[in-house]
Image (cartoon, rainbow, N blue to C red):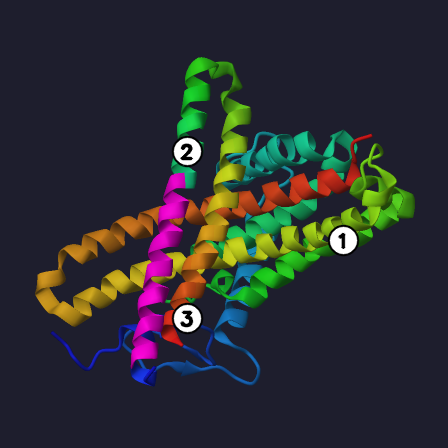
C-alpha cells in the first residue's frame, strides 16, 4: 500500500492540458508562451498529415502501391460509403475533401494520444468544440447560402404541420441543431477522456497496491487495444454523423 | 447536515452515477448489437447498411452515457 499516492491527481495530471510536456525519465519540458501541450499536439498532427500527404503520397503513380494504396482506399471509403449515400452524388463529391480532412485530423490526434510520450488533444473539450463548431456553421450558414431562407424553413418545418404548432417547432428545431453539434463535440471528448482515465486508473492500481495488483497491467493492455479500435471508430462516427446531419439540412424531405 | 457527511454523500452519489451510466450504456449498446446481429442473420445481404446504422446507434447511446461518466467523475473530483 502506498498511502501518499493521490490517484485523482495522477489521472488528472495526465489527461488535462498543461504548459509543460511530460517526457519519460526526464523532468517535464516547459513550453514557451501560450503554447500548451494539447496545442503542441495539434501542430504535430498537422505537420504529420501534411508530411504524409505532400511527401509520401505519390499522386502520379499509374498503379498505386504501399502507403498511397492504403490512403486511397480510406479516401475512397469515405467518398463511396459516407459522403455519397448521405449527401447525394454532387454534394457528396464536393464534401469529400472536408470530411477526409476532419477524419485524418481526428484519427491522427487520437492515435498519437495513445503513444505514451504524447498527450491526447482530442481529450480536450476546446479541440472537439472547434471541430464541432465547423459542422454547426455548415448546418446553419451552409444551408442558408445553398438553399436560402426558404430552404432552411423547409428543412426545419414539415409542410403538413398545423399552423399553430409552427412557433413551437421553430424553437425545438433550432435547439436540435445546437444539440446535434454539441453532441458531436461531447461524444468525441468523452470517449477519448474516458479511455485515458480507465487506462490510468488501472496503472494507478499498480502504484497503490504494488505487486499484488500486477494483473491490472493486463487489463490496461486490453483497454489499450480497445482504445485503438475506439480511436478509429470515433473518427469514423464523427464524419458519418456530420455527413448525415448536413444531408438532412441540405436535402429536406418534401 | 455536517459538511463532512455531505461531502461523503456527494462522493457516494457521484460513484453511483458512474455505475448507473454504465448500466444504461451496457443495456443500450447490447440491445443495438443484438438486433443488428439478428437482422444480419435473417437478411445477410443487408449487412453493409445495417453495420452503418449499428455504429450510428451505438455512438448516439455511448456518447451520452460517457458524458454521464465524465461529469460524475468531475463531480467526484470537485
Q: Assign a secondary structure to mark 3.
A: helix
Dot 3 corresponds to which residue?
Answer: B75
Examine the structure image and report whether residue A61 is included in the region drawn in magenta.
Answer: no
The residue lying toward the viewer, choosing from A128 and A232, is A128
Examine the structure image and report whether residue B12 is included in the region drawn in magenta.
Answer: yes
Dot 1 corresponds to which residue?
Answer: A171
Instruction: Select label 1 or label 3 by which is in front.
Output: 1
Mark 2 vs mark 3, CA separation in Å: 29 Å
Instruction: Identify the image quadrant of residue B73.
Output: bottom left
Output the chain of dot 2.
Answer: B
Mark 2 vs mark 1, CA separation in Å: 32 Å
The C terminus of chain B lies in quadrant: bottom left
Vertical placement of residue A145 versus A79, above or below: below
Q: Earlier in the sequence, mark 2 or mark 3?
A: 2
Residue at the spot 57% in from the left edge and 29% down from the top edge: A63
The reply to whether label 1 and label 3 mark residues of one chain is no
Q: Assign a secondary structure to mark 1.
A: helix
Res. A98 in view: yes
Instruction: Identify the image quadrant of residue A198.
Output: bottom left
Residue at the spot 33% in from the left edge and 55% down from the top edge: B19
The percent position of residue A169, horizontal first and vertical second, equals 77, 47
Dot 2 corresponds to which residue?
Answer: B31
Magenta residues, start to end: B5-27
Amino acid at each position: 500500500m502506498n498511502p501518499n499516492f493521490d490517484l485523482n491527481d495522477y489521472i488528472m495530471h495526465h489527461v488535462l492540458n498543461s504548459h509543460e510536456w511530460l517526457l519519460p525519465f526526464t523532468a517535464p519540458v516547459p513550453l514557451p508562451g501560450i503554447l500548451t501541450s494539447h496545442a503542441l499536439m495539434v501542430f504535430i498532427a498537422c505537420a504529420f498529415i501534411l508530411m504524409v500527404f505532400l511527401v509520401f503520397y505519390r499522386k502520379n503513380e499509374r498503379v498505386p502501391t504501399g502507403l498511397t494504396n492504403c490512403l486511397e482506399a480510406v479516401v475512397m471509403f469515405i467518398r463511396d460509403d459516407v459522403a455519397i449515400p448521405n449527401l447525394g452524388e454532387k454534394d457528396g463529391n464536393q464534401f469529400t475533401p472536408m470530411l477526409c480532412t476532419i477524419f485524418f485530423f481526428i484519427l491522427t490526434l487520437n492515435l498519437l494520444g495513445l503513444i505514451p510520450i504524447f498527450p491526447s488533444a482530442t481529450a480536450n473539450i476546446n479541440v472537439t468544440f472547434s471541430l464541432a463548431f465547423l459542422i454547426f456553421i455548415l448546418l446553419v450558414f451552409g444551408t442558408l447560402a445553398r438553399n436560402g431562407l426558404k430552404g432552411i424553413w423547409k428543412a426545419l418545418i414539415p409542410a403538413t404541420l398545423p399552423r399553430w404548432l409552427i412557433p413551437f417547432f421553430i424553437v425545438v428545431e433550432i435547439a436540435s441543431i445546437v444539440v446535434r453539434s454539441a453532441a458531436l463535440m461531447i461524444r468525441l471528448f468523452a470517449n477519448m477522456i474516458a479511455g485515458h482515465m480507465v487506462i490510468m486508473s488501472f496503472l494507478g492500481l499498480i502504484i497503490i497496491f504494488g505487486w499484488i495488483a500486477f494483473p491490472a497491467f493486463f487489463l490496461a493492455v486490453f483497454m489499450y487495444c480497445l482504445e485503438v479500435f475506439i480511436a478509429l471508430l470515433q473518427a469514423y462516427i464523427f464524419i458519418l454523423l456530420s455527413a448525415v446531419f448536413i444531408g438532412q439540412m441540405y436535402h429536406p424531405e418534401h | 447536515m455536517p459538511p463532512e457527511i455531505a461531502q461523503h454523500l456527494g462522493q457516494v452519489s457521484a460513484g453511483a452515477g458512474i455505475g448507473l451510466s454504465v448500466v444504461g450504456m451496457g443495456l443500450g449498446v447490447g440491445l443495438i448489437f443484438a438486433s443488428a446481429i439478428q437482422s444480419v442473420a435473417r437478411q445477410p445481404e443487408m449487412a453493409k447498411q445495417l453495420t452503418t446504422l449499428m455504429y450510428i446507434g451505438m455512438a448516439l447511446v455511448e456518447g451520452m452515457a460517457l458524458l454521464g461518466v465524465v461529469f460524475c467523475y468531475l463531480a467526484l473530483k470537485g
